[in-house]
Image: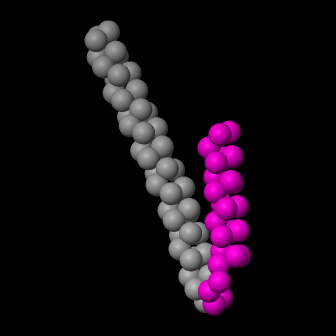
Amino acid sequence: MLAWGSFLAFLALTIIGLATLKEPLMVKGYYLMGSIGLISSAFTVAKVVRDNQEDEERYNQMFRAKDVENAEE
């Protein structure tokens, strides 16, 4: 829950910063798109790392079960 709160707080601060920035709209749009790209890539990296860890755990469980079957024979 703390992670989501932190995410929302910094997202709000970024939006406020862009709204009060005294630059042309094109510059604000560039910063906004950069921020969105960073956020989406951070979520993607977190998901891929989690999925790889889950796959490795399943792979290890599968071979542990196979080793137990071979030991019983």
Q: Residue sitting at 55 percent across and 63 percent down?
A: 40
Q: In which quarter of the image is residue 65?
A: top left
Residue 15 lies in magenta, yes or no?
A: yes
User: Is residue 29 among what the camera can see?
Assistant: no
Q: Quadrant of the N terminus?
A: top right
Q: Check the image and name the residue furthest to the top.
A: 72
Tell me if 69 is positioned left or right of 35 in this view.
left
Residue 22 lies in magenta, yes or no?
A: yes
Span shown in magenta: 1-25
User: Is 41 rendered above or below residue 34?
Assistant: above
Magenta span main SS: helix
User: Is 4 rendered above or below residue 27?
Assistant: above
Return the residue nearer the eye: 60 or 26.
26
Q: Residue sitting at 41 percent across and 32 percent down?
A: 57
Q: Percent from the top left, x then y, of residue 62? A: 39, 29
* Count of numbered circles on the image: 0
Tell me if 34 is positioned left or right of 13 in this view.
left
Q: Percent from the top left, x then y, of residue 46? A: 49, 50
User: Is 44 rendered above or below residue 66?
Assistant: below
Q: Residue sitting at 53 percent across and 74 percent down?
A: 34
The colour scheme used here is: one colour
Q: Residue sitting at 64 percent across and 66 percent down?
A: 14
Q: Percent from the top left, x then y, of residue 50? A: 48, 43
